[in-house]
Image: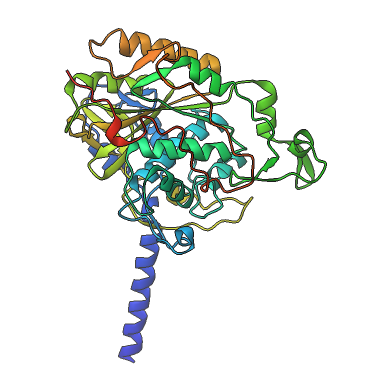
Protein backbone atom coordinates (compact mmCIF):
# COMPACT_ATOMS: atom_id res chain seq x y z
CA UNK A 1 0.00 0.00 0.00
CA UNK A 2 2.86 2.35 0.80
CA UNK A 3 4.43 1.73 -2.59
CA UNK A 4 1.20 2.55 -4.39
CA UNK A 5 0.77 5.80 -2.45
CA UNK A 6 4.38 6.69 -3.10
CA UNK A 7 3.90 6.03 -6.80
CA UNK A 8 0.81 8.26 -6.80
CA UNK A 9 2.73 11.06 -5.12
CA UNK A 10 5.54 10.73 -7.66
CA UNK A 11 3.04 10.76 -10.51
CA UNK A 12 1.41 13.92 -9.15
CA UNK A 13 4.81 15.55 -8.74
CA UNK A 14 5.84 14.60 -12.25
CA UNK A 15 2.56 15.95 -13.62
CA UNK A 16 3.04 19.21 -11.72
CA UNK A 17 6.62 19.58 -12.97
CA UNK A 18 5.47 18.88 -16.50
CA UNK A 19 2.79 21.56 -16.31
CA UNK A 20 5.22 24.07 -14.81
CA UNK A 21 7.69 23.40 -17.60
CA UNK A 22 4.98 23.67 -20.24
CA UNK A 23 3.55 26.94 -18.97
CA UNK A 24 6.71 28.46 -17.55
CA UNK A 25 6.51 31.40 -19.91
CA UNK A 26 2.90 32.17 -18.96
CA UNK A 27 3.63 32.88 -15.29
CA UNK A 28 2.81 36.51 -14.59
CA UNK A 29 5.92 38.25 -13.35
CA UNK A 30 4.86 41.90 -13.45
CA UNK A 31 6.41 42.58 -10.06
CA UNK A 32 9.77 41.16 -11.12
CA UNK A 33 9.70 43.30 -14.24
CA UNK A 34 8.92 46.47 -12.33
CA UNK A 35 11.63 45.81 -9.76
CA UNK A 36 14.11 45.34 -12.58
CA UNK A 37 13.27 48.63 -14.26
CA UNK A 38 15.07 51.56 -12.67
CA UNK A 39 12.92 54.00 -10.73
CA UNK A 40 13.78 56.89 -12.98
CA UNK A 41 12.24 59.85 -14.71
CA UNK A 42 14.21 59.02 -17.82
CA UNK A 43 12.04 57.89 -20.73
CA UNK A 44 11.95 54.26 -21.85
CA UNK A 45 12.08 53.87 -25.63
CA UNK A 46 10.73 50.72 -27.32
CA UNK A 47 10.76 50.54 -31.13
CA UNK A 48 9.91 54.19 -31.66
CA UNK A 49 7.47 54.48 -28.73
CA UNK A 50 8.27 56.46 -25.58
CA UNK A 51 7.06 55.49 -22.10
CA UNK A 52 7.29 56.90 -18.61
CA UNK A 53 8.06 53.94 -16.36
CA UNK A 54 6.31 55.57 -13.41
CA UNK A 55 3.01 56.36 -15.10
CA UNK A 56 2.83 54.03 -18.12
CA UNK A 57 3.97 50.66 -16.78
CA UNK A 58 0.95 48.77 -18.08
CA UNK A 59 1.30 50.18 -21.59
CA UNK A 60 5.02 49.50 -21.59
CA UNK A 61 4.52 45.88 -20.52
CA UNK A 62 1.81 45.35 -23.11
CA UNK A 63 4.11 46.63 -25.85
CA UNK A 64 7.02 44.40 -24.82
CA UNK A 65 4.80 41.33 -24.40
CA UNK A 66 3.31 41.86 -27.86
CA UNK A 67 6.63 41.40 -29.63
CA UNK A 68 7.00 37.95 -31.18
CA UNK A 69 9.65 36.04 -29.21
CA UNK A 70 11.53 33.27 -31.00
CA UNK A 71 13.80 31.05 -28.95
CA UNK A 72 15.73 27.83 -29.26
CA UNK A 73 13.42 24.91 -30.03
CA UNK A 74 13.80 21.15 -29.76
CA UNK A 75 12.05 18.09 -31.18
CA UNK A 76 11.41 19.53 -34.64
CA UNK A 77 11.94 17.52 -37.82
CA UNK A 78 15.67 17.15 -38.61
CA UNK A 79 17.02 19.98 -40.76
CA UNK A 80 17.70 18.65 -44.24
CA UNK A 81 16.24 15.29 -43.24
CA UNK A 82 19.32 14.09 -41.36
CA UNK A 83 20.55 17.23 -39.59
CA UNK A 84 19.94 18.56 -36.07
CA UNK A 85 16.45 18.49 -34.54
CA UNK A 86 17.26 21.34 -32.14
CA UNK A 87 19.06 24.66 -32.60
CA UNK A 88 20.13 24.97 -28.97
CA UNK A 89 23.65 26.36 -28.76
CA UNK A 90 23.95 27.63 -32.32
CA UNK A 91 20.68 29.16 -33.55
CA UNK A 92 20.40 32.31 -31.43
CA UNK A 93 21.21 34.76 -34.24
CA UNK A 94 18.79 32.94 -36.53
CA UNK A 95 16.10 33.40 -33.89
CA UNK A 96 16.96 37.09 -33.56
CA UNK A 97 16.72 37.40 -37.33
CA UNK A 98 13.27 35.84 -37.14
CA UNK A 99 12.26 38.38 -34.48
CA UNK A 100 13.32 41.44 -36.46
CA UNK A 101 11.59 40.12 -39.57
CA UNK A 102 8.46 39.20 -37.61
CA UNK A 103 8.31 42.74 -36.24
CA UNK A 104 8.35 44.05 -39.81
CA UNK A 105 5.53 41.67 -40.80
CA UNK A 106 3.46 42.64 -37.76
CA UNK A 107 3.85 46.33 -38.62
CA UNK A 108 2.95 45.60 -42.24
CA UNK A 109 -0.09 43.41 -41.64
CA UNK A 110 -1.36 44.51 -38.21
CA UNK A 111 0.21 47.93 -37.55
CA UNK A 112 2.63 49.14 -34.89
CA UNK A 113 -0.25 49.88 -32.49
CA UNK A 114 -1.45 46.26 -32.48
CA UNK A 115 -1.26 44.51 -29.09
CA UNK A 116 -1.35 40.82 -28.23
CA UNK A 117 -3.92 39.48 -25.77
CA UNK A 118 -3.11 36.37 -23.76
CA UNK A 119 -6.74 35.28 -23.75
CA UNK A 120 -6.71 34.84 -27.52
CA UNK A 121 -8.94 36.30 -30.21
CA UNK A 122 -6.06 37.34 -32.46
CA UNK A 123 -6.75 38.33 -36.09
CA UNK A 124 -6.27 35.79 -38.86
CA UNK A 125 -3.23 37.63 -40.24
CA UNK A 126 -1.49 37.26 -36.88
CA UNK A 127 -1.71 33.47 -37.14
CA UNK A 128 -0.59 33.61 -40.77
CA UNK A 129 2.52 35.47 -39.64
CA UNK A 130 3.24 32.84 -36.98
CA UNK A 131 2.85 30.07 -39.57
CA UNK A 132 5.71 31.65 -41.52
CA UNK A 133 8.08 30.92 -38.61
CA UNK A 134 7.02 27.47 -37.43
CA UNK A 135 9.88 24.99 -37.11
CA UNK A 136 9.23 22.91 -40.19
CA UNK A 137 10.73 22.81 -43.65
CA UNK A 138 7.71 24.24 -45.50
CA UNK A 139 7.50 27.47 -43.46
CA UNK A 140 9.24 30.21 -45.37
CA UNK A 141 11.20 31.70 -42.44
CA UNK A 142 11.68 28.53 -40.39
CA UNK A 143 15.02 27.68 -38.85
CA UNK A 144 15.17 24.90 -41.47
CA UNK A 145 15.02 27.34 -44.37
CA UNK A 146 17.37 29.83 -42.75
CA UNK A 147 19.99 27.21 -41.90
CA UNK A 148 19.94 25.72 -45.38
CA UNK A 149 19.99 29.10 -47.12
CA UNK A 150 22.95 29.99 -44.92
CA UNK A 151 25.01 27.29 -46.60
CA UNK A 152 25.25 29.62 -49.59
CA UNK A 153 26.67 32.28 -47.29
CA UNK A 154 29.47 29.93 -46.25
CA UNK A 155 27.81 28.74 -43.03
CA UNK A 156 27.36 25.04 -42.34
CA UNK A 157 24.14 23.87 -40.70
CA UNK A 158 24.74 24.20 -36.96
CA UNK A 159 27.29 27.01 -37.30
CA UNK A 160 26.88 30.35 -35.53
CA UNK A 161 25.83 33.35 -37.65
CA UNK A 162 26.75 37.02 -37.44
CA UNK A 163 24.27 39.88 -37.96
CA UNK A 164 25.29 40.49 -41.58
CA UNK A 165 24.98 36.86 -42.60
CA UNK A 166 21.49 36.45 -41.14
CA UNK A 167 20.44 39.66 -42.92
CA UNK A 168 21.61 38.24 -46.25
CA UNK A 169 19.68 35.02 -45.57
CA UNK A 170 16.47 36.95 -44.79
CA UNK A 171 16.88 39.00 -47.96
CA UNK A 172 16.95 35.86 -50.09
CA UNK A 173 14.16 34.03 -48.29
CA UNK A 174 11.86 37.06 -48.59
CA UNK A 175 11.90 36.60 -52.36
CA UNK A 176 9.74 33.50 -51.89
CA UNK A 177 7.20 35.09 -49.55
CA UNK A 178 4.34 35.89 -51.93
CA UNK A 179 1.88 36.87 -49.23
CA UNK A 180 3.86 39.69 -47.60
CA UNK A 181 5.73 40.84 -50.71
CA UNK A 182 8.35 42.37 -48.42
CA UNK A 183 11.41 44.05 -49.91
CA UNK A 184 14.47 43.37 -47.76
CA UNK A 185 17.34 45.74 -48.49
CA UNK A 186 20.69 45.07 -46.84
CA UNK A 187 23.10 48.00 -47.07
CA UNK A 188 26.69 47.56 -48.21
CA UNK A 189 29.88 49.23 -47.04
CA UNK A 190 28.04 51.23 -44.33
CA UNK A 191 26.10 53.07 -47.03
CA UNK A 192 22.35 53.32 -47.60
CA UNK A 193 21.53 54.27 -51.19
CA UNK A 194 18.13 55.94 -51.56
CA UNK A 195 18.02 55.41 -55.33
CA UNK A 196 18.58 51.66 -54.99
CA UNK A 197 15.96 51.24 -52.28
CA UNK A 198 13.30 53.04 -54.30
CA UNK A 199 14.18 50.96 -57.33
CA UNK A 200 13.78 47.75 -55.33
CA UNK A 201 10.56 48.77 -53.57
CA UNK A 202 8.90 49.98 -56.77
CA UNK A 203 9.67 46.70 -58.47
CA UNK A 204 6.45 44.77 -59.11
CA UNK A 205 6.27 41.03 -58.61
CA UNK A 206 5.85 40.15 -62.25
CA UNK A 207 5.32 36.71 -63.70
CA UNK A 208 4.51 35.06 -60.42
CA UNK A 209 2.55 31.85 -60.79
CA UNK A 210 2.23 31.12 -57.11
CA UNK A 211 -0.77 31.50 -54.83
CA UNK A 212 -0.01 32.63 -51.27
CA UNK A 213 -0.39 29.96 -48.60
CA UNK A 214 -0.70 30.43 -44.82
CA UNK A 215 2.92 29.45 -44.30
CA UNK A 216 4.12 32.16 -46.68
CA UNK A 217 5.20 29.92 -49.55
CA UNK A 218 3.23 29.81 -52.79
CA UNK A 219 1.44 26.95 -54.47
CA UNK A 220 0.91 26.81 -58.26
CA UNK A 221 -2.19 28.42 -59.73
CA UNK A 222 -4.54 26.05 -61.51
CA UNK A 223 -4.31 25.77 -65.27
CA UNK A 224 -5.71 28.82 -67.06
CA UNK A 225 -6.13 30.75 -63.80
CA UNK A 226 -4.89 34.32 -63.77
CA UNK A 227 -3.23 35.79 -60.67
CA UNK A 228 -6.22 38.13 -60.26
CA UNK A 229 -8.67 35.22 -60.37
CA UNK A 230 -6.52 33.18 -58.01
CA UNK A 231 -6.49 35.97 -55.45
CA UNK A 232 -10.28 35.66 -55.25
CA UNK A 233 -10.43 32.55 -53.14
CA UNK A 234 -12.86 31.03 -50.70
CA UNK A 235 -12.60 30.94 -46.91
CA UNK A 236 -15.46 28.80 -45.63
CA UNK A 237 -18.61 30.05 -47.35
CA UNK A 238 -17.42 33.53 -48.20
CA UNK A 239 -15.18 34.73 -50.99
CA UNK A 240 -12.57 37.29 -49.98
CA UNK A 241 -9.85 39.17 -51.79
CA UNK A 242 -6.30 38.20 -50.94
CA UNK A 243 -4.69 40.96 -48.79
CA UNK A 244 -1.56 40.71 -50.92
CA UNK A 245 -3.64 41.40 -54.04
CA UNK A 246 -5.27 44.41 -52.43
CA UNK A 247 -1.98 45.95 -51.37
CA UNK A 248 -0.50 45.46 -54.84
CA UNK A 249 -3.43 47.18 -56.50
CA UNK A 250 -3.43 50.11 -54.08
CA UNK A 251 0.24 50.97 -54.18
CA UNK A 252 3.32 50.44 -56.33
CA UNK A 253 5.53 50.44 -53.21
CA UNK A 254 6.48 47.17 -51.55
CA UNK A 255 6.85 47.33 -47.74
CA UNK A 256 10.53 47.73 -46.87
CA UNK A 257 12.66 46.08 -44.22
CA UNK A 258 15.91 48.03 -44.25
CA UNK A 259 18.85 46.30 -42.55
CA UNK A 260 22.13 48.15 -42.00
CA UNK A 261 24.99 45.89 -40.86
CA UNK A 262 27.73 47.84 -39.11
CA UNK A 263 30.86 47.34 -37.10
CA UNK A 264 31.03 50.11 -34.54
CA UNK A 265 34.55 49.57 -33.29
CA UNK A 266 37.17 46.84 -33.13
CA UNK A 267 36.78 44.76 -29.98
CA UNK A 268 34.23 46.95 -28.20
CA UNK A 269 31.68 49.51 -29.31
CA UNK A 270 33.27 52.90 -29.78
CA UNK A 271 31.57 55.28 -27.28
CA UNK A 272 31.29 57.94 -29.99
CA UNK A 273 28.46 55.90 -31.58
CA UNK A 274 26.39 55.26 -28.46
CA UNK A 275 24.14 58.30 -28.68
CA UNK A 276 23.47 57.70 -32.38
CA UNK A 277 22.58 54.08 -31.63
CA UNK A 278 20.08 55.22 -29.00
CA UNK A 279 18.56 57.67 -31.47
CA UNK A 280 17.78 54.75 -33.78
CA UNK A 281 15.31 53.36 -31.21
CA UNK A 282 13.49 56.70 -31.12
CA UNK A 283 12.73 56.74 -34.85
CA UNK A 284 9.11 55.64 -35.51
CA UNK A 285 10.31 53.22 -38.20
CA UNK A 286 12.58 51.39 -35.73
CA UNK A 287 12.44 47.62 -36.11
CA UNK A 288 15.13 46.83 -33.54
CA UNK A 289 18.79 45.90 -33.65
CA UNK A 290 20.55 42.57 -34.07
CA UNK A 291 23.64 42.20 -31.92
CA UNK A 292 24.79 40.97 -28.55
CA UNK A 293 28.04 39.66 -27.19
CA UNK A 294 30.56 37.30 -28.82
CA UNK A 295 28.59 34.16 -29.80
CA UNK A 296 25.55 35.37 -27.84
CA UNK A 297 22.90 37.04 -30.00
CA UNK A 298 20.12 39.26 -28.69
CA UNK A 299 17.27 41.18 -30.30
CA UNK A 300 17.44 44.74 -28.97
CA UNK A 301 14.12 46.59 -28.90
CA UNK A 302 14.89 49.75 -26.95
CA UNK A 303 16.79 51.45 -24.17
CA UNK A 304 16.48 53.25 -20.86
CA UNK A 305 19.30 55.48 -19.70
CA UNK A 306 22.58 53.79 -20.61
CA UNK A 307 21.09 50.30 -20.86
CA UNK A 308 19.68 48.42 -23.82
CA UNK A 309 16.45 46.41 -23.55
CA UNK A 310 16.41 43.10 -25.40
CA UNK A 311 14.61 39.83 -25.99
CA UNK A 312 16.77 36.80 -25.26
CA UNK A 313 16.45 33.70 -27.48
CA UNK A 314 18.50 31.49 -25.13
CA UNK A 315 15.59 29.46 -23.78
CA UNK A 316 14.89 26.00 -25.21
CA UNK A 317 11.22 25.15 -25.77
CA UNK A 318 9.55 22.29 -27.60
CA UNK A 319 8.56 22.88 -31.22
CA UNK A 320 4.92 23.82 -31.77
CA UNK A 321 2.86 21.75 -34.18
CA UNK A 322 0.09 23.40 -36.17
CA UNK A 323 -1.82 22.50 -39.30
CA UNK A 324 -1.73 24.85 -42.27
CA UNK A 325 -4.57 27.34 -42.14
CA UNK A 326 -5.30 26.74 -38.45
CA UNK A 327 -4.53 28.86 -35.40
CA UNK A 328 -1.23 28.51 -33.58
CA UNK A 329 -0.82 27.82 -29.85
CA UNK A 330 1.02 31.09 -29.35
CA UNK A 331 1.65 31.30 -25.60
CA UNK A 332 5.31 30.32 -26.00
CA UNK A 333 5.85 33.00 -28.68
CA UNK A 334 5.47 35.92 -26.26
CA UNK A 335 7.89 36.60 -23.43
CA UNK A 336 6.02 37.34 -20.22
CA UNK A 337 9.19 37.49 -18.16
CA UNK A 338 10.95 40.71 -17.39
CA UNK A 339 12.79 42.04 -20.45
CA UNK A 340 16.53 41.76 -20.07
CA UNK A 341 18.83 44.76 -19.96
CA UNK A 342 22.54 45.24 -20.52
CA UNK A 343 24.90 48.18 -20.49
CA UNK A 344 25.44 49.65 -23.92
CA UNK A 345 29.19 49.64 -23.36
CA UNK A 346 29.10 45.82 -23.18
CA UNK A 347 27.66 45.54 -26.69
CA UNK A 348 29.72 43.72 -29.30
CA UNK A 349 30.61 46.19 -32.11
CA UNK A 350 29.09 43.97 -34.82
CA UNK A 351 25.41 44.93 -35.13
CA UNK A 352 22.65 45.28 -37.71
CA UNK A 353 20.12 48.12 -37.46
CA UNK A 354 16.58 47.40 -38.63
CA UNK A 355 13.89 49.79 -39.89
CA UNK A 356 10.47 49.17 -41.44
CA UNK A 357 8.89 51.57 -43.95
CA UNK A 358 5.41 50.65 -45.12
CA UNK A 359 5.12 53.35 -47.79
CA UNK A 360 7.33 55.61 -49.84
CA UNK A 361 6.29 58.57 -47.69
CA UNK A 362 7.29 56.54 -44.65
CA UNK A 363 10.73 55.95 -46.17
CA UNK A 364 11.13 59.63 -47.10
CA UNK A 365 10.28 60.52 -43.50
CA UNK A 366 12.91 58.05 -42.27
CA UNK A 367 15.53 59.65 -44.54
CA UNK A 368 14.73 63.10 -43.15
CA UNK A 369 14.90 61.91 -39.55
CA UNK A 370 18.23 60.17 -40.11
CA UNK A 371 19.71 63.27 -41.69
CA UNK A 372 18.45 65.57 -38.94
CA UNK A 373 18.82 63.44 -35.80
CA UNK A 374 21.72 61.09 -36.58
CA UNK A 375 23.92 62.55 -39.29
CA UNK A 376 23.84 66.33 -38.87
CA UNK A 377 24.28 66.13 -35.08
CA UNK A 378 27.24 63.73 -35.12
CA UNK A 379 30.85 64.44 -35.98
CA UNK A 380 31.38 60.77 -36.80
CA UNK A 381 28.55 59.04 -38.64
CA UNK A 382 27.46 55.47 -38.02
CA UNK A 383 26.57 55.07 -41.69
CA UNK A 384 26.20 57.16 -44.83
CA UNK A 385 22.89 58.02 -46.47
CA UNK A 386 23.37 58.97 -50.13
CA UNK A 387 20.89 59.87 -52.84
CA UNK A 388 22.50 58.14 -55.82
CA UNK A 389 24.21 54.84 -56.46
CA UNK A 390 28.01 55.26 -56.10
CA UNK A 391 29.55 55.20 -59.59
CA UNK A 392 32.45 52.97 -58.52
CA UNK A 393 30.08 50.24 -57.29
CA UNK A 394 28.75 47.46 -59.49
CA UNK A 395 25.32 48.29 -60.98
CA UNK A 396 22.42 47.66 -58.59
CA UNK A 397 20.10 44.89 -59.74
CA UNK A 398 17.05 44.34 -57.49
CA UNK A 399 16.92 40.71 -56.34
CA UNK A 400 14.26 38.58 -58.02
CA UNK A 401 12.80 35.18 -57.36
CA UNK A 402 14.10 32.38 -59.63
CA UNK A 403 11.67 31.40 -62.36
CA UNK A 404 11.18 27.84 -61.12
CA UNK A 405 9.24 26.38 -58.22
CA UNK A 406 11.42 25.62 -55.22
CA UNK A 407 11.61 26.05 -51.51
CA UNK A 408 14.20 28.72 -52.09
CA UNK A 409 17.07 27.24 -50.11
CA UNK A 410 18.54 25.63 -53.22
CA UNK A 411 19.08 29.00 -54.87
CA UNK A 412 22.28 30.61 -53.69
CA UNK A 413 23.33 33.62 -55.72
CA UNK A 414 27.01 34.43 -56.06
CA UNK A 415 26.70 37.80 -57.79
CA UNK A 416 26.00 39.82 -54.65
CA UNK A 417 28.82 38.62 -52.41
CA UNK A 418 30.56 42.03 -52.39
CA UNK A 419 30.89 43.34 -48.84
CA UNK A 420 28.83 40.44 -47.42
CA UNK A 421 31.26 38.65 -45.14
CA UNK A 422 31.78 39.67 -41.55
CA UNK A 423 35.46 40.29 -42.24
CA UNK A 424 34.72 42.82 -45.01
CA UNK A 425 33.05 45.41 -42.80
CA UNK A 426 34.71 48.80 -42.81
CA UNK A 427 35.92 49.47 -39.28
CA UNK A 428 34.39 52.66 -37.92
CA UNK A 429 36.51 54.45 -35.36
CA UNK A 430 37.99 57.81 -34.58
Q: Is residue 22 visible?
A: yes
When asked about the image quadrant of residue 16, the answer is bottom left
Residue situated furthest bottom in the rendering: 1
**For this view, does 154 lie left or right of residue 361?**
left
Instruction: Say which residue appears at 77% left-offset and 33% top-offset.
Output: 228
Query: Is 422 left or right of 212, judged from the image as shown?
Result: left
The front one of 289 and 14 is: 289
Nearest the eye: 13 or 166 = 166
Residue 114 can be seen, yes or no: no
- Image coordinates of residue 112 in percent, x first then y, are 49, 28
Q: Is residue 95 above or below residue 426?
A: below
Identify which residue is drawn at 78% across, 40% down.
Answer: 239
Between residues 312 and 292, which one lies in front from this camera angle?
Answer: 292
Residue 56 locus on image (x, y percent): 36, 27
Residue 146: image location, x then y, percent: 45, 46
- 227 sits to left or right of 409: right
Taking the spot 50% from the left edge, 38% from the top edge, the residue there is: 172
| Residue 52 image-quadrant placement | top left
Quadrant that contains the N terminus: bottom left
Q: Residue furthest right?
A: 224
Horizontal and vertical percent for residue 251? 64, 20
Task: Pick the quarter of the image with the C terminus.
Answer: top left
Q: How many marks?
A: 0
- Chosen colour scheme: rainbow
Q: Nearer the viewer, residue 137 or 126?
A: 137
Up/down of 293 relative to 349, above or below: below
Amino acid sequence: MFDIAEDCRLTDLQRTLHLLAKYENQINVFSEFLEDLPDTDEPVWVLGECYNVKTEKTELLSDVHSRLWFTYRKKFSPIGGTGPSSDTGWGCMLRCGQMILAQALVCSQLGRAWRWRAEGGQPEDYHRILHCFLDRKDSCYSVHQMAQMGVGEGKSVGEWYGPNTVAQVLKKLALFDDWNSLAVYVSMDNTVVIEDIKKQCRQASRGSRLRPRPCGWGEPFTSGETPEQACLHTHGNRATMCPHSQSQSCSDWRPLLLVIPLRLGINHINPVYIQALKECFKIPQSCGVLGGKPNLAYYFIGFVGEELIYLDPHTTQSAVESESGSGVDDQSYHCLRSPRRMKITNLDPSVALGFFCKSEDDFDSWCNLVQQEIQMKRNLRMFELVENHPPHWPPFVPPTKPEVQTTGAEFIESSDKLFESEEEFEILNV
